[in-house]
Image (tube, rainbow, N blue to C red):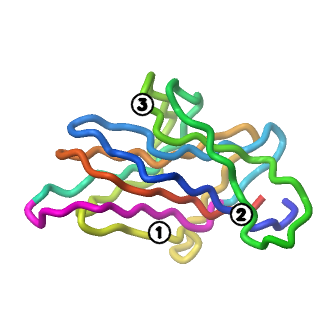
Amino acid sequence: MAGIDAYLQSSKIECPAGTAQTMLQLVAAANQRLVVDRISASFEGIANTDEPILIRIVRQSTAGTGGDAVTPYPADEGVDETLTASGLEDIDGGDPTETNLLWSELVHPQGGFSWTPAMVGKEIKVKGGGRIAIEATADDAVDGVFRFEYEE
């Protein structure tokens, strides 16, 4: 690893009602490991009686279909090296193939969460060519934004 801090940020995406959907997927380059430092999601729900959204952090082995490309950016704008990771958001066609669940949480649609794996001794490494994703399942449709902060 070269020690380049970077982030992958989604646009505002609708979490559809009643179905799990990959909201943001971070993809490591073929021979480049990544270390995920922080994962976050926030929502713009308006009713305090809405049911919580199930957020799952999963490893995936495929891209799925229907996603939109997202460009990762270095956290320090003075970095000259080219980032090697890539990303997809709003994968609303065929579901990516999930290989394992890393973590899940219920989050109220009027709020959000930010999880820092290293703070709890659970550093997440993504192998070269690997994928990690934020998946959301909401009872009622709600818009949200999603983010990975990572090191390559």
Please state the horizontal and vertical placement of residue 90, each as a whole percent of the image: 46, 39
Q: Which mark is residue 92?
A: 3
11 left or right of 82 in image: left
Sequence-wise, the earlier of marks 1 and 2 is: 2
Sequence-wise, the earlier of marks 3 and 2 is: 2
Residue 144 lies, with reference to residue 139, above or below; the image says below
Q: Nearer the viewer, mark 1 or mark 2?
A: 2
User: Mark 1 near mark 2, Cβ–Cβ under 8 Å?
Assistant: no
The secondary element bearing badge 1 is classed as strand
Residue extent of the magenta highlight: 36-49
Q: Nearer the viewer, residue 130 or 122?
A: 130
Q: Which residue is mark 1?
A: 115
Residue 31 lies, with reference to residue 35, above or below; the image says above
81 left or right of 96 in image: right
The secondary element bearing badge 2 is classed as strand
Q: What is the spatial separation of the Cα atoms under label 3 and label 2, in whole angstroms? A: 25 Å
121 left or right of 51 in image: right
Please state the horizontal and vertical placement of residue 10, each as a whole percent of the image: 52, 52
Q: What is the spatial separation of the Cα atoms under label 1 and label 2, in whole angstroms? A: 16 Å
Picture quadrant where residue 144 is located: bottom left
Q: Amino acid at mark 3?
A: Asp
Q: What is the spatial separation of the Cα atoms under label 1 and label 3, in whole angstroms? A: 25 Å
Residue under the point 52% across and 42% down: 89
Q: Crowding at label 3, few (<14), some or many (≥20) Cα neighbours within 10 Å?
A: some
Question: Which quadrant does the C terminus fall into?
Answer: bottom right
Q: Crowding at label 2, few (<14), some or many (≥20) Cα neighbours within 10 Å?
A: many
The secondary element bearing badge 3 is classed as loop
Q: Which residue is mark 2?
A: 6
Q: Amino acid at mark 1?
A: Trp
Q: Is residue 120 magenta?
A: no
